[in-house]
Image: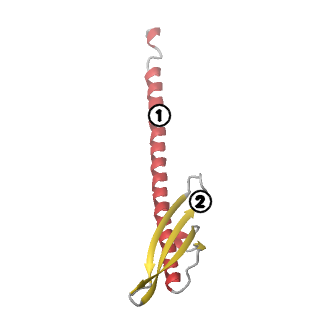
Amino acid sequence: MDRQMSGFALIPALFLIVVLGVLAVVAIRVGTGQQQAVTMSLLQARALSAAQTGVEWGAYKALNGSCVASTTLTLTEAALNGFSVIVTCSAVTFSTGAATNTSYVLNSAATTGLYGQPGYVHRVVSGTYTNAT
């Protein structure tokens, strides 16, 4: 066997190992990125539900005579556990014919996580309700 031919397979073998290693790293990064995107999408949907919950709670309170300027709710049940919801209410009285009614504007901001951190989500929902029939 010729001495110049020895070790010829070493270079392609090393190249193949490096290429497969790079492909494995890329596959792991793509999978991790997709998992984080799905997690954030789920958190955003939960934040939207928490904010809608705040508006509904505020509407119930307002239509039953308690329009508080600002209230903070800490949700503890099921998928909304850990969300902090700030509900603000403002009332405007108006007349329709002989009747005097009230219109309530509700804003609800739901937050979880710490600002600047990967798990931070913030959603705002508004609603207008009236006691007119």
Placement of 123 over or under 72, stated as above or below: above
**Residue at the limit of the structure toward the bottom, as seen here:** 98
Q: Amino acid at mark 2?
A: Gly
Q: Residue at x 54, y 75 (%)?
A: 89
Residue 92: x and y in percent read 49, 78
Q: Secondary structure at mark 2?
A: loop
Residue denoted by label 2? 113
In-front residue for pair 125/89 = 89
Residue at 44 percent across and 78 percent down: it is 129
**Image quarter of residue 67:** bottom right
Dot 1 amino acid type: Val
What is the x, y in percent for residue 96?
A: 39, 85
Circle 1: element type: helix
Name the residue beneath numbered marker 1: 22
Q: Earlier in the sequence, mark 2 or mark 1?
A: 1
The crowding category of the residue bearing disc 2, from other C-alpha atoms within 10 Å (few below 14, some 14 to 19, many at least 20), is some
Q: Position of residue 117 (x, y in %)?
A: 59, 52
Image coordinates of residue 125 in percent, x first then y, are: 47, 67
Q: Tag on residue 80?
A: none
Say whether residue 79 is visible: no
Nearer to us in this view, 52 or 20? 52
Which residue does the image show at 48% across and 74% down from the upper left?
105
Give the Cα separation between the discs numbered 2 and 1.
34 Å
- If the image is split into quadrants, where does the C terminus sit? bottom left
- Residue 128, placed above or below residue 122: below
Q: Quadrant of the N terminus?
A: top left
